[in-house]
Structures are given as C-alpha cells and as structure tokens.
Amino acid sequence: MAATSAPPSEAAASKSDTGSEASLDVSVLRELARKGLIDALNSVNGAKTLVLDPTLAGPLGLVTEVALLKHHGVDKMFWLEPGPLSATSTNIVYLCRPLIKWVKIVADQIKRHARESQKHTYTLFLVPRTSTLVTRILEEEGVLGDVTVHSYNLQFIPLAEDVISLENDNAFKEIWVDGDETVVYDSMQALLTLEKLHGLFPRIIGKGDYAARLAHLLTRNTPQASSNAPSDNHLNAPSETIDSLIVLDRRVDMITPFLTQLTYQGLIDEIIGIKNSHVELPVSLISPPSTTTQPDGSANVGAASSSTTPATSLAKEKKRKHHLTTATDPLLSELQDLNFSAVGKKLNQVARRLDEDYKVRHQAKTVAQLRDFVGKLGGLQNEHQSLRLHTGLSEMLVPLTRTEEFNKSLEIQQNLLALYDTNAQITAIEDMIAQGADMRVVVRLLCLASVVLGGVKAKSLENIKRELLQTYGYNYLPLLLSLSSPPLSVLLPNPLPPNTPPSVAESKYPYANLRKSLRLLIEDPDPLEELENDISYVYSGYAPISVRLVQCVAQKGGVLSNPAAERERKGADGDSSRKGSASTLVQAHPIVGWKGFEDVIASIPGETVDTVQRIPGTQDGSAVPSVATLMLPRERPTTTVVFFLGGCTYTEIAALRWVGRQNKGRKFLIATTGIINGSSMIDSIVGTTSVTSKEVGL
C-alpha cells in the first residue's frame, strides 16, 4: 500500500494558472497521507488497539485527528514502550519507524502475550517503508510468523502553504553521525511523489555530497518508476508548474543553524520550542478571554491585547499544546517572518486598527450597516484573540532575550561572523562555561567558532573540551567525539594534526572568502527598515549562506546587491520592499544553474550538481528539452522547489519567502527533512528524548 497510489489531480498543479501569486497546492500531500493511514487501518478488520511510536504522534497529528482513527476502528491507543501491553481487542496494530529498538519491543510484547496465553492478531506498519533488517530481527526473535508486516508510506507533510516536511527529527544525526543514508532514499521517494503529481523537475541543481547522491537517486529512479506505474503519466514530461529543484545538504552551511534565530517564529523555536508546528503555551493565552467592554460599550481591545498577567506568572501556568498555523491564526502570517525587534510595533498597529474597527458599530445607523458589522464581527473576534495570544507570547520572550547569557551569546556570534578579535571570543566562550551557561549554547558557539575560523587553536580547544566535560558531565564525551569526527567534523583543531584524513582537511570551510563573495554581512545596518531590504534581516545583519546559494541560482542579482533597495532608489513605493508591489517587481530570470558563481560554489566543500532531466523512454535523448529552452521565460508563474537535506531553520524559511517577494513569476516551495535549530541538532546527537505517558487518551 503506497500513499502515492492516488491518481494525480490536475487541480493540484497550481492554485491559479495566472497571476503572480500562483503556487503549488500542497494540501493534496496531506490528503495522500490521510488516505494512506485510513487504508492501513481498514486493512485490519474489526476493533483494534493502536500502539504508536511516540516520534510519530506529532507528524500524524498534522494529517489526521483522533476522531478519524476512532471512526476506522481504533478502540485504544498506547505509546510503544518497553513493558507489558494490556489490549482488550483481538487486533493489535503497531505503527512505528523501522528502528531496532522499536522492533525488539514489539517482539517482546508478542512473546509475553504467548507466555500468558493471550491470543491476538498482530499487524506491524513501518513508516515510511518496510526493511529487511526488521524482518531479520523478527525472525531472530522467533515471532516473524505471528505478525503481518506492511508499510505506511508517510512522506511530505504540509506545515504551511509554502513549506512541506518529512518531519524526521533525526535526519541530520542519521546521515552525518550514524552514517545511515536511509533518509536520502526516503527523501528521493518523497520528491518522486512531487514529480508524479506535477511532472519531472526540468532541472536539478544541488550542492553537497549527499545532495549529489539524492540527485543521482532521483534521476536514476524516475524512468524505473514510470515503467512500473503506468498511471504516473506526469513522469513522461517536464513539469509546467515547477521550473527546477534545488537540493542543499545541511553540511554545505553549518554556520546558519548554530546562530540564534532572530525572527519571531525562529525565536519562539529557540526559546520555547516548536515541535511539529505545535508549541506549549500557558492555558490562559490559548483560551478565549471573557468579553470586556468599556463604559461606552466598545470592546476593550487595548486591555485584551496587552496581557494583564505578568510574564513570570505565565511561565508558572499549566501548559497546553497550541498549533501555530496561519490557517486559523490571522496574525501569524504577518508576524512569523519579522525580525523580533519589529514585532512590538506591528502588534501596536494591529491593536489600534482593531479598536477603530470596533468603533465602526457606533457609526452604523441603518439595519444594513449593522448587518455588515455583525458579518465582520467573527473575523474581528478571531483577530482579537490572535492579538491577545501573540502579545502574551511576546511578553514571555522579551525577558528571556534580555538575559546576560542571551546577549553575551549574540555578541560572540556577531564578533565571530565579523572575524573580530577572535581570540577574545574563544576566551568569552570559556567564561560562559565557568558561569554555568546552557550546555547547548556553549557547544553551538564553539562549533560556530571552529567552522568560521577553520578550527580552534589546539591547546585552547583541548582546554575547552576538558572544562565542558568537568562542568556538564562526562556523558557528553560521545557528543564531542561526534562533532570532531568524520563525516561531521565541525569541531576541529587548527592546525590539523599530521595524521588527519584528507577528507577532513578538504572539508574546512572557506568562510572568510565567502563573506565577501556572497555578501554575507551587512555592516552597521541603520535603520532596521533599511536592513529588511536584504535577507540578512533574519539574523540582524547576517545573510544565511544556504539562502545566498539559492539566490545564486534563482536571483543572481540579489547576491551582489539588494533588489528591494534598488527599487527604492528608483523611486518605488517604500512599502513595496515588504509587500512586493506588482508594478515595481521585475520578472524572475530563467534558471541557468550556477552560471556566474562557478568559482564561489567550487570553493565550498562537497559535490556540485546541475542536471537537465532526461525524459524516460527515449534512447537518443530527442525528447530532452534543450538547455536553451529551459532558459526561456515561462508564460505563467512557476515554482522552484528548494529541498534541505538534513533540516532547515525557520529563519531560512523567512529569508526564502523574502526572496520570493522580490520578483514576479517565481514562487518557492520549501521542502525539508525537518525543522531544526542548533539546540535540536545537538539534542539529536546526544539522544535526548521526551518522556511519554503510558496510554494515549482518546
């Protein structure tokens, strides 16, 4: 059973065939995931007990709901964890990723039931596909004949209209620490599903060794897939809605995730944590407030929008998960990509506007005018609650951004990026260890220093490692070894020891050269509005290398100068730099690969990819579109898919959205193995997991 078996819909090609706002409709991916789960459950007749891998709960929550599971026969739900399983139904369905630890738990529970003479029918669904290793383990445990093994092909999950994710939190660790390339194959399958829906990617461009492997897998499997699946006729022609696929593996830009994110959504992720688009917030912020009115009868927007509860009290409140989504939150789309320093001003503007909208009802003198106001009231109340939520959330963040640790960390980051007094920055990192700063903050700074400087002086590095272990515990020794060893190698001494493998020596990052050639730093931005004329606003002056690489392909002029600032200088409306006024935007140039930046790209470690896809079924290549054809402007707006192999940050998403607003004719669909930040990367390497309860309440 494959989730991609549903026939592709022409409606999924784009929301609109005309207009600069045309973009791919990703909701079909959610429907494929939902249908795949329903088909899996329906294949087991009768009532069933669902035993769920805890790491799948979040992703599944984005594609289905508990009511749907109950409707398709799920009686009880339990987390998959060691120990006995008490199931009242005959059918037990396990749903998990194909990892050894989960399969052994399944085998133990089956054997326990056999010893206790309990009779059940067992079905194991592996996500996203079956594995020979799983079959071998079940055979070794002696339970292979007792369980039916299938797959549930969970692939891309839409997180927003322009963001899709595999929601694999451990993708980075699996590739660059464990050396497990399974996620590369899974990524290929998910991208192949996009091709089945929209047609072949006309051009595949990439940077990084694993990006090259993914591109090779994708081009190698496309003809094979089309011959095995005659219904996938979209694989027989280039896509008319997608102009290219850009693949970047995370190792190409390790600087960006180690930095502290400074956009609103990025800062929420850094400080509070966003997991599968959900964030844990105080109940009082999520629950609608009691209606408050002023003496004149108007709604008290000001009182409701400014939290009456101190941030310290909010921090102590009981927490509840809240889904951060623009689908139900009218303000999130305006706030999520702003630099946090601009959020307060935006909230004040919204509060004043809402106050004015509520006062309109006093000017309504006719029944028709009153009816119009009542029609708008639901939207106003939704905005009102959204304003209250984000004001309270901002008030929670502000005290945390004013701590000495937070600001010292930012100062060290900015100085390292500017290559300013680097010895003093290493000393400052040592001081933070002595002050007992958060371990993840210290490790992020240390890795950042190593990547930016091409390594840390050997004596200083050994001293810091020793202090780290003595301060935080020797259980972090495996973490330091992983960071220092191939293929990751982000924590290195300078100079490298004589016995260093050539692959490590070749992986040293040329930051000093890239800083100039890719215009990574905007010096002394003043004022903030001027800074937001470039993607560097997401880090208050630093442009993410990954997004600069995308610009090298899709917005070449934006690498060397600010397109929005150029328009301003030509007399365009000042607000167009944020909104993207259609009258001032220039037509996006055709995709011509890395042309113009070949030397810069070659200096970055890792393979470089630029492939024009061959149409399946032709031997002489006669059906291959010529490069000249691909370089011609498209008649209608197209989408460029940008895939981050190993995860991307919210700030990179914000920066890519900014790039997409600067031209007409091209939108970006951001695809990733998961949403990450520096702390979550370190947690995954350490193996930190959250504690779960025994039964999942239905």
Image (tube, rainbow, N blue to C red):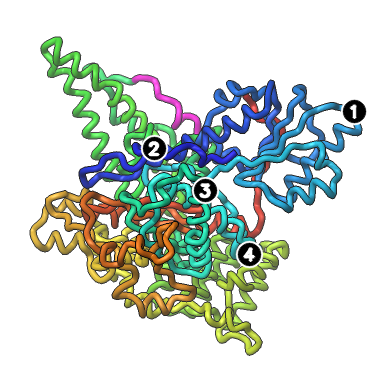
Location of residue 215 with respect to 6 vertically, above or below: below
Among all residues in the image, which is located at the extreme top? 367
Position of the N terminus, as image quadrant, is top right
Residues at badges 4 and 1 in contact (C-beta under 8 Å)? no
Specify few, some or many for label 2: CA neighbours under 10 Å numbering under 14, 14-19, or 20 or more: few
Q: Which residue is mark 1?
A: 117
In this orientation, which residue lies closer to the viewer: 695 or 10?
A: 10
| Residue 283 magenta | yes
Answer with the quarter of the image where residue 446 lies: bottom right
Specify few, some or many for label 4: CA neighbours under 10 Å numbering under 14, 14-19, or 20 or more: many
Mark 4 residue type: Val
Residue 183 screen position, x and y as percent: 58, 56
Q: Which residue is mark 2?
A: 9
Tell which circle, 3 or 2, labels the residue nearer the N-terminal end: 2
In this orientation, which residue lies closer to the viewer: 656 or 4?
A: 4
Query: Which stretch did the figure color magenta?
Result: 282-291
